[in-house]
Image: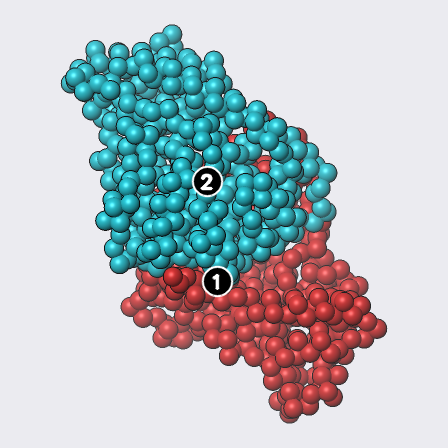
Chain colours: A cyan, B red
């Protein structure tokens, strides 16, 4: 009596191993700044809870399997502002973007199918691929050129007869990369030529600091091939409300996805009531949020560029930096920061990048920095990172990289 | 570019085809009583929304992947009252009982594995099996003896070397069957002898009108083999809150299930805040609810026993009747009731039973009646069913069964 191979094939977040150490650090009186998780600290717009207060029915009934009509209509108006024209029957509401992704994987691919995706990638894609029996095939992108999409030839070389899809996150987590029109065109040409489904995960759509939002869903040639994944979590600082979306103009795909939605009956009624209000927010709300994150991004950059040996282009989207540090093993450095470093009783927790690669040996010297702290805290956290690196160099010279290969 | 075989293998709820007809009936001014779905009409306890009003934080953050600690503790106290001793690390909170079931299927079984289950069965098990690549193998149970579990020999004959689990719903949907101690023992002996996982879906635990609640989870010999599925939906009339549970004492199973929970990040924070309050309700609340359903069950029974040719023992649990009608095809009768029957501008919608069988040819003369209407409406709905059958007999004698094989 063993558990299934598909779940055995799943990994666990690398971060989990640090939490017991963080607890020990706290027990020693150390304050920890968290740069490791993408949990925004922006206040959730009050409309969410106010509407729940007013709109709660006597009997909390199942919502429709495909999501409440009024929420899909409200979302439709929002999408149109971004040039995405989806009718309400081209849209399903899911338990967060995660369910949207899992259902899409289960629907589009058979076990054994290959899906191409730029690396580094959002780590949870790996677990969803394991559960679905899909083989993710990475095409590497690099900090040195801001994680630009590889050239057509590199992409084509990775394609085999088993390749059935292309999976992208735009703006990128963990890279903060925003795809350019030219890169989107490259994806479109590839998908059209090789009959690939394109899954575009756009949960950070608003978080663009330079350049413009371009989606493969803007290209009508891909109407039958493109599936958009979305979520209110980051956009409205409402991660705890499990409201995601999956959008497609392919009727067969939508019919199949709807069967999966029927299988799990419904999404939280109360969260849907609250979410409807959030979609009424416009650019005034987003502008303020984006300005705040832009400021934070710049704070991280101003510090990173003063640290010898760090490689990190300024990201243009989302709220993450993927940075190369001058260390042999980022996992060791992160652990050392929690167990052996402090300044004035404070330290910082980072995310190791190996979680964001298909081969855990990759990204050994990289970390992900989520800039989701208030400016003052972020400045302090970055100063701690800088001082930590200096102290690590002295304490563990053998674990530190030679400065000859400095950026 | 086709959708996956696993989703192609999924069915759609048979009921869906009636809804356009219901809309047409409504457009003709007909009032329809719904006996077809298990959506309770009992008021959701007000503690749910009151607590949300008080307890909503400024930032609606991700909850823990395994579910909030305080909700798991509150649930633990509730389970102990039913003789189920699960610590909070033997418990995960899921997006409804549906996610608990899907994750359990994905965890315990490999594609191609067989799982034994009494038929008729909760229809959604079939869709989850298709998605997971599992082969459900039915052992038939019958209206004539209240859907009693088959004898040991019948169960054993259905077991092959591929059989890895036994799946049961207790109390049963659609049967209303409550397993006796002797039947639970039979399941336990079978599972122990053949090394089967036992999945016991107990979302109707409180809804028992005669006899006692007995669970395979009460038998410590099954600690490593038993997984309990649960949900607050029916119990607290809170279907729209997506709060389910999966419980097991098998550490390896729990570790695997936790990975699936991490994959989808979290369950609705607001629903978890509300649910915590619901678990404070005690037998005073349940007694009132159960008395109400008992009364409704008896209303249905009093009517059914006056209809010639109907076979339906009085169920002892849940809020469903699975009844044999004196018709050749229940699907035709149900459709006819919506398109061609009315009395004083009213008619009734039933659930066809073929959805509740693995082979859609089975259960052709059976319907499921959900008694989730107020007494007065239920009396009227049943009277309409009775009159409808009489009218159907006159209108479609060829579709009606000979009265010689009356119960």
Residue in view at x 64 percent, y 83 percent: B327
Picture coordinates of residue A73, whole percent (x, y): 63, 48
Q: The residue marked by circle 1 belongs to what chain?
A: A
Q: Kindly identify which numbered label has been placed on residue B23.
A: none
Front-most of B372 and A398?
A398
Which quadrant would the N terminus of chain B be assigned to in this image?
bottom left
Q: Is residue B384 above or below residue A311?
A: below
The answer to whether any part of residue A220 appears in the image is yes
Instruction: Give the residue drawn at x 41%, y 40%.
Output: A181
1 or 2: mark nearer the eye? 2
| Left or right for A225, reference A235 | left
Q: Position of residue B186 (x, y in %)?
A: 42, 66
Q: What number is the disc on residue A252?
A: 1
Q: Which residue is mark 2?
A: A214
| Residue A361 image-quadrant placement | top left
Q: Mark 1 Cα within 10 Å, few/some/many (few <14, many 20+)?
A: some
- The answer for which chain carries disc 2 is A
Same chain for the residues under marks 1 and 2 in the image: yes
Residue B316: x and y in percent read 61, 65
Instruction: Sort mark 2 into few (<14), some (14-19) or many (20+) by Cα contacts within 10 Å.
Output: many
Could you tell me if residue B231 is visible in this image? no
* Secondary structure under the numbered disc 1 in the rendered image: helix
Q: Position of residue A38 (x, y in %)?
A: 44, 30
Number of marks present in the image shown: 2
Distance between the Cα atoms at labels 1 and 2?
A: 25 Å
Q: Quadrant of residue B178?
A: bottom right
Q: Quadrant of the C terminus of chain B?
A: bottom right
1 or 2: tag closer to the N-terminus: 2
Work out which residue is located at the far right of the displayed protein and give it. Answer: B344
Q: Residue at x 64, y 51 (%)?
A: A69
* Residue beneath the point at 39% across and 59% down: B132
Q: Which residue is farthest top? A: A344
């Amino acid at each position: 009596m063993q558990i299934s191979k598909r779940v055995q094939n799943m990994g666990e977040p690398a971060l989990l191993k640090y939490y017991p150490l963080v607890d020990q650090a706290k027990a020693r009186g150390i304050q920890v700044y968290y740069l490791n998780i993408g949990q925004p600290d922006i206040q959730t717009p009050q409309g969410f809870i106010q509407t729940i207060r007013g709109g709660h029915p006597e009997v909390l009934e199942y919502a429709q399997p495909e999501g409440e009509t009024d929420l899909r209509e409200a979302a439709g108006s929002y999408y149109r502002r971004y040039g995405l024209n989806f009718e309400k029957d081209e849209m399903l509401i899911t338990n967060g973007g995660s369910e949207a992704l899992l259902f899409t994987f289960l629907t589009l691919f058979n076990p054994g199918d290959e899906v191409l995706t730029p690396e580094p990638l959002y780590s949870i894609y790996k677990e969803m691929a394991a559960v679905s029996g899909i083989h993710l095939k990475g095409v590497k992108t690099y900090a040195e050129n801001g994680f630009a999409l590889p050239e057509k030839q590199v992409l084509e070389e990775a394609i085999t007869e088993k390749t059935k899809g292309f999976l992208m996150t735009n703006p990128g987590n963990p890279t903060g990369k925003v795809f350019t029109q030219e890169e989107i065109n490259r994806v479109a040409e590839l998908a059209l030529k090789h009959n690939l489904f394109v899954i575009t995960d756009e949960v950070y759509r608003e978080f663009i600091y330079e350049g413009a939002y371009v989606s493969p869903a803007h290209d009508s040639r891909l109407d039958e091939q493109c599936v958009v994944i979305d979520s209110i979590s980051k956009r409205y600082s409402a991660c705890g409300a499990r409201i995601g979306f999956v959008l497609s103009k392919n009727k067969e795909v939508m019919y199949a996805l709807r069967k999966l939605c029927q299988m799990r009956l419904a999404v939280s009624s109360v969260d849907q009531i609250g979410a409807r209000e959030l979609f009424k927010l416009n650019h005034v709300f987003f502008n303020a949020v984006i300005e705040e994150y832009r400021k934070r991004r710049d704070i991280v950059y101003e510090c990173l560029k003063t640290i010898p040996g760090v490689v990190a282009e300024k990201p243009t989207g989302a709220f993450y930096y993927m940075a190369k540090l001058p260390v042999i093993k980022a996992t060791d450095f992160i652990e050392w920061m929690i167990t052996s470093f402090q300044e004035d009783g404070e330290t910082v927790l980072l995310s190791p990048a190996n979680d964001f690669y298909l081969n855990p040996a990759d990204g050994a010297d990289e970390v992900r920095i989520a800039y989701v702290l208030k400016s003052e805290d972020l400045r302090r956290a970055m100063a701690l990172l800088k001082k930590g690196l200096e102290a690590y160099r002295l304490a563990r010279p053998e674990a530190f990289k030679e400065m000859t290969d400095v950026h």
